[in-house]
């Protein structure tokens, strides 16, 4: 009794000091307190305890070597062997959480794997993955939430969603404890739905603060109007430049990327040029159309355009640019263009011009490993079977005949040594910049349009935008 | 702040209780003297300081705590998972230590706890020194509410109090380790044993409890600012073989594993008083959510949170300068930048920029640090093969970079490991080129300027859909 009174008093003193509102509630007169002196709690009988069941939050799995469809190990794992290829049959242990993680965040510098063994990939960038100004948020369609509207707070109000996140260990020689080794670790989710806004864009004559360099020249095909250096010269931006380094200087973002991108690409590129035919300048104007466009007629791709999806499997370590060759592009236009149904182009793009990626994927992960590892896909079944029903254009594995061989494997695209990001479904659709003026082309340059590999264009103006992920006025983008 | 109700309650219970103590036989309180009311009124409680010198906390390697699993509701993709953490200990990082394979009369095979090969050490001389202790206290710090109002401007008349548990600002490095079991499908033949060793300290960390200030959601709030410095190792190889019997502590191999060296991390979850980790029930199936709610769209609040340089509207220049620690100039809000923005560094070498040709040129070098060799074991992230007899084979590191993609045929062109300015030895050539080595260093990494706008984890237990 004495202890009960004393403890009750001490408890109320503490409450009064720090939570006066709660302590003022009329509790003491009505409640006969238990010996531990905490109001509002009743002792549970054993029978009550027996009714309580805890639900398990964590799951696990063990996937033995060679146990899934499409496994390729040992001598079959040479150059050219893709999914399922691992030099050794690893055993994989997974630990996952039965839950959903929603996340919105900004990272000003995201660098993984700087230096180390992948410096053996000779010259170039120093990190496996190197991204400036990365924002993770939700999406609307194939764009980050709020894309294209500087005043919208849809980005910062949205979330990327990772469903059933998990960690997976790649273990070598699992059956022999003295030779057992951890070879790689993967962090993934059964499904990821969201978007990333990447990098920074500059205005006219602004100096690029992330990629300053002096003294380079701006060489490219054609003469192109607005393709002249900005007043302060090299290192400064000219967003009006239709292509080339003065356009590239307007961008910072992905300095390097390592991983697999199952990309769907579509673009409608309005172009203009004059072709010098024996001293006579003949105009050429039209729109080059490629891939599956949401509104082809609205972007100059009408008149029987096939509008078929274009899927590109891009992969590798320390990628800093993409070079697409032998790209056949439907061409609708006037002048010389009126006699061209299709042209061929080589598109070279530094990764810094890419400012967003949408993620809607069942096998997204980031991993790091000491050797090549083919991790089991999240669903552990052939990739084509993981395409959502009724959505054949989901990715390259959704189409019927003609899908890539990797789609028949239950393993993700084989990783390289180092850091690796697996993005099986990345949409880069409906790229539709303002008119690209090539200026004056020689006849030889014009003829290269008619056959593979095609006319090469470096760093064309795509006008892809970053997305605001902060509150504040229209100017507030990254915080 | 005492309300009248509080004072009444105190009179009803506390004073009689204390007075009752005085009636007890004096022999029960030998050496104690009764306090007069005047003495009691001059006492004010501020906190508890915990000074631990020559400290070690260690349990037997067969002691554990367990997360018991259950069969999942969603079919064959997953199985039941049971996780156990054995032999958790916090001990010294100096010479003198032991492995987990305790035996009758002994602590286990002797080893040197100043190395990452040794999981358990001696005592920690100054885990929390008497002049820099762990601190548990009630406090009323300055801050901003969810509605934008500043709180506790008058220290003599505080608006809101918190409880906080503060780590020392400096402490000795120590070893924290455990060995674990992952058991799949409750099958004794599907157990993976592993060892985790952390050597460093968590000085500067803070854990705070307070009442959240979001109107209509004034719930229990947690703030955790985690600071870690040190090294980490995860390994699975056993030194002496034997069966993987559940509960039997192995002697782990000295060498094998995955390492993170020179880790320096600060992860802020929550900010006083406008952002916090909160808990709530979800539905009626026993599910819960743990979340950091969305920030209010209130300029006073996000002004503190973003901590932009004066004149920086877009936010990029603040982030860029913070990366290099250049806070010169108008810094009115920047003092809060390092509190609201986290980071995690593993190693010390990072390129600061990249010019348009893709090469690291003069003026674009990493600031300080050392670029790791392909087989470095003193920095960054690396994997080591197992040692001993028989030793594991060397690792075949392999990577390639796609240089062109033929859209028409789908054919890809690659560049491979080859002649390089770093002198990395290559075995084979072209598509067969590899780096064959006992230790594979993946380089250094950093995540900087990390700002969590909001997050939410919600459990889906017992549901086929999530």
Image (spheres, coloured by chain):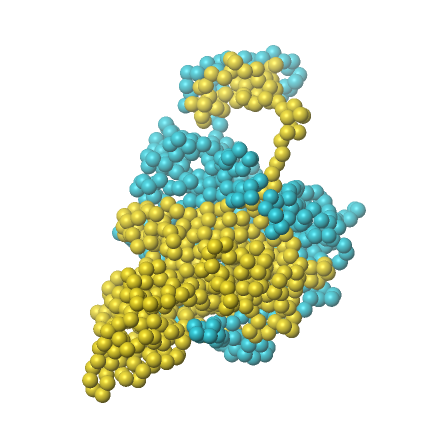
Q: Is residue A260 above or below residue B131?
A: below
Number of marks in picture:
0
Give coordinates of residue B100: x percent, y percent. 71, 50
Q: Is residue A247 above or below residue B274?
A: below
Q: Residue furthest front?
A: A304
Give coordinates of residue A308: x percent, y percent. 40, 65
Give coordinates of residue B71: x percent, y percent. 64, 44
Foreground residue among A237 and B430: B430
Foreground residue among B228 and B301: B301
The colour with which the image depicts chain A is yellow
Quadrant in which the N terminus of chain B is drawn: top left
Q: Residue at x 38, y 29 (%)?
A: B158
Give the image quarter of residue A358. Answer: bottom left
Q: Is residue B290 above or below residue B261?
A: above
Give coordinates of residue B82: x percent, y percent. 65, 45
Foreground residue among A283 and A153: A283
Foreground residue among A255 and A353: A353
Q: Residue at x 28, y 65 (%)?
A: A300
């Amino acid at each position: 009794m004495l202890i009960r009174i004393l403890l009750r008093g001490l408890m109320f003193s503490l409450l009064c000091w720090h939570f006066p509102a709660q302590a003022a509630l009329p509790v003491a007169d009505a409640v006969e307190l238990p010996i531990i002196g905490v109001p509002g709690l009743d002792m549970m009988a054993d029978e009550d305890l027996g009714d309580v069941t805890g639900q398990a939050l964590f799951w696990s799995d063990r996937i033995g070597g060679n146990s899934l469809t499409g496994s390729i190990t040992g001598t079959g794992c040479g150059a050219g062997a893709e999914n399922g290829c691992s030099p050794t049959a690893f055993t994989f242990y997974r630990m996952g959480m039965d839950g959903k993680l929603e996340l919105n965040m900004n990272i000003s510098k995201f660098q993984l794997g700087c230096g180390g063994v992948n410096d053996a990939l000779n010259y170039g960038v120093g990190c496996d993955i190197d991204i400036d100004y990365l924002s993770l948020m939700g999406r609307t369609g194939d764009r980050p939430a709020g894309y294209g509207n500087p005043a919208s707070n849809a980005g910062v109000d949205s979330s990327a969603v990772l469903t059933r996140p998990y960690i997976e260990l790649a273990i070598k020689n699992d059956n022999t404890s003295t030779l057992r080794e951890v070879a790689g670790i993967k962090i993934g989710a059964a499904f990821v739905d969201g978007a990333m806004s990447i990098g920074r864009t500059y205005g006219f004559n602004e100096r690029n603060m992330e990629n300053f360099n002096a003294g380079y020249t701006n060489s490219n095909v054609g003469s192109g109007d607005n393709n002249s250096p900005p007043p302060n010269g090299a290192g400064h931006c000219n967003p009006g430049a239709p292509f080339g380094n003065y356009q590239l200087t307007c961008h910072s973002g992905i300095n390097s990327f390592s991983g697999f991108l199952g990309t769907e690409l579509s673009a409608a590129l309005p172009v203009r040029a004059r072709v010098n035919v024996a001293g006579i300048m003949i105009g050429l104007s039209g729109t080059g159309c490629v891939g599956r466009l949401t509104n082809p007629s609205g972007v100059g791709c009408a008149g029987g355009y096939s509008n078929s999806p274009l899927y590109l499997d891009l992969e590798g370590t320390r990628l800093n640019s993409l070079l697409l060759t032998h790209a056949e592009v439907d061409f609708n236009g006037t002048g010389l263009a009126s006699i061209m149904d299709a042209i061929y182009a080589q598109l070279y793009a530094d990764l810094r011009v890419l400012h967003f990626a949408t993620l809607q994927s069942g096998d997204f992960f980031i991993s790091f490993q000491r050797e090549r590892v083919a991790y089991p896909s999240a669903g552990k079944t052939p990739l084509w079977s993981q395409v959502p029903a009724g959505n054949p254009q989901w990715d390259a594995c959704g189409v019927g005949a003609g899908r890539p061989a990797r789609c028949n494997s239950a393993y993700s695209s084989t990783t390289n040594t180092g850091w690796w990001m697996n993005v099986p479904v990345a949409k880069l659709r409906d790229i539709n910049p303002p008119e690209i003026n090539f200026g004056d082309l020689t006849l030889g340059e014009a003829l290269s349009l008619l056959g593979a590999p095609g006319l090469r264009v470096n760093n064309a103006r795509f006008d892809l935008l970053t997305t605001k992920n902060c509150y504040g006025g229209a100017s507030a983008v990254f915080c | 702040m005492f309300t009248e109700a509080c004072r009444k309650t105190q009179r009803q219970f506390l004073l009689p209780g204390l007075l009752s103590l005085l009636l007890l036989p004096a022999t029960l309180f030998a050496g104690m003297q009764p306090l007069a009311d005047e003495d009691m009124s001059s006492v004010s409680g501020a906190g508890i300081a915990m000074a631990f010198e020559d400290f070690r906390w260690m349990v037997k390697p067969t002691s554990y705590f367990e997360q018991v699993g259950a069969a999942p509701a969603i079919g064959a993709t997953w199985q039941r998972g049971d996780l156990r953490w054995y032999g958790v200990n916090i001990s010294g990082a100096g010479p003198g230590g032991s492995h987990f394979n305790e035996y009758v009369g002994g602590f286990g095979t002797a080893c040197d706890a100043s190395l990452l090969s040794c999981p358990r050490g001696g005592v920690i001389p100054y885990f929390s020194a008497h002049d820099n202790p762990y601190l548990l206290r009630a406090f009323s710090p300055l801050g901003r509410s969810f509605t934008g109002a500043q709180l506790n401007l008058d220290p003599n008349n505080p608006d809101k109090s918190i409880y906080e548990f503060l780590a020392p600002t400096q402490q000795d490095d120590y070893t924290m380790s455990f060995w674990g079991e992952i058991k799949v499908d409750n099958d004794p033949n599907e157990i993976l044993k592993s060892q985790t060793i952390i050597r460093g300290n968590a000085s500067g960390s803070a854990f705070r409890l307070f009442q959240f200030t979001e109107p209509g959601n004034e719930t229990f709030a947690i703030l955790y600012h985690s600071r870690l410095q040190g090294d980490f190792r995860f390994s699975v190889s056993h030194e002496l073989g034997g069966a993987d019997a559940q509960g039997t502590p192995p002697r782990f191999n000295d060498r094998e594993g995955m390492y993170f060296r020179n880790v320096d991390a600060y992860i802020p979850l929550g900010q006083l008083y406008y952002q916090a980790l909160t808990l709530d029930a979800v539905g009626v199936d026993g599910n819960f959510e743990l979340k950091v709610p969305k920030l209010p769209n209130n300029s006073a609040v996000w002004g503190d949170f973003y901590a932009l340089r004066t004149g920086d509207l877009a936010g990029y220049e603040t982030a860029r300068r913070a990366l290099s620690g250049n806070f010169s100039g108008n810094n009115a809000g920047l003092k809060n930048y390092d509190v609201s923005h986290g980071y995690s560094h593993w190693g010390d070498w990072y390129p600061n920029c990249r010019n348009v040709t893709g090469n690291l040129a003069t003026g674009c070098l990493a600031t300080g640090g050392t670029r790791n060799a392909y087989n470095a074991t003193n920095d960054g992230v690396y994997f080591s093969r197992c040692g001993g007899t028989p030793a594991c084979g060397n690792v075949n590191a392999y990577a390639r970079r796609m240089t062109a993609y033929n859209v028409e045929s789908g054919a890809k062109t690659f560049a491979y490991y080859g002649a390089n300015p770093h002198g990395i030895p290559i075995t084979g050539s072209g598509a067969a080129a590899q780096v064959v080595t006992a230790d594979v260093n993946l380089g250094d990494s950093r995540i900087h300027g990390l700002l969590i706008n909001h997050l939410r984890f919600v459990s889906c237990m017992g549901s086929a859909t999530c």
